[in-house]
Amino acid sequence: MLAPTEEIIVITSATSTVPAGWPSTSRLIDPVRPAPRRSRAMRVESRAGTATVDSMMIGHAHFPCFDAETVPASLSPRVIRDCLRGDLGFGGLVMTDDLDMGAILNTFGWDESIRRAVLAGNDMIMICHRLDAAEEALRVLEHTPAKDLDPALETVAQLKSRLAPPHEFSEPRHRELDQAVWDLRVATLGGESAARRSPEDAKRSPVEVY
């Protein structure tokens, strides 16, 4: 995107992944052999240079080498605060993967997941399917002590300060973009499939309704 000075601003992001040969489970149930804190995966991350990355999205895999309790990495202080922030020295923005997933909801429930996400050290909590879930999360955050939220708010503010202002919004421009998205959907799926909605369940993205 272009900043007012005409400089090109690039905000980089990365997603926590499971390196080849380092077993894990996204279902949070399979046993995993322990691994040392300074594992090969961490050396790979260090060589990649976390200082060049602006944000990290943390997935929901469980790593028993960090947590004996069944805790997804996205909700783990040991993964985010101790490993990512401490051992790797990452100072950018950290966000969860979508918390509106069965692996999270079926393990801790909604309120507890939101609280754990904050205490683990995430700066942003991603909720990608249900609009009412975002409102429920806001209710939980409103009852969260300011001292637990202030570090995240500061990190978000720092990242926003580096972003160029968004383009001015207008309804005609929105309709143009909406039509462009629809045309791409038709070109990709064909007219009949494009007009077919996904099942009305928790997996439907609200974007499909717009």
Image (cartoon, grey):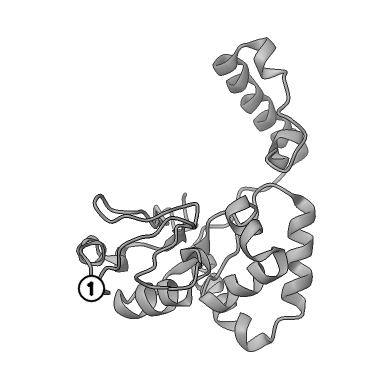
Judge left or right: residue 62 versus residue 193.
left
Relative to 197, does residue 13 appear above or below in the rendering? below
Q: Nearer the viewer, residue 94 or 29?
A: 29
Relative to 22, does residue 146 appear above or below in the rendering? below
Tell me the element at label 1.
loop
Structural crowding at the residue carrying mark 1, measured as other residues with C-alpha within 10 Å and reported as few (<14), some (14–19) or many (≥20): few
Relative to 31, does residue 168 appear above or below in the rendering? above
The number of callouts visible is 1
> For residue 195, what is the image quadrant?
top right
Task: Give the x, y percent position of residue 16.
Answer: 39, 57
Task: Give the x, y percent position of residue 56.
Answer: 43, 61
Query: What residue type is disc 1 on?
Result: Arg
Residue on which the image places disc 1: 38
Task: Give the x, y percent position of residue 115.
Answer: 65, 74
- Quarter of the figure with the C terminus: top right
Q: Give the residue at x 49% y 72%.
A: 69
Q: Give the residue at x 25% y 49%.
A: 20
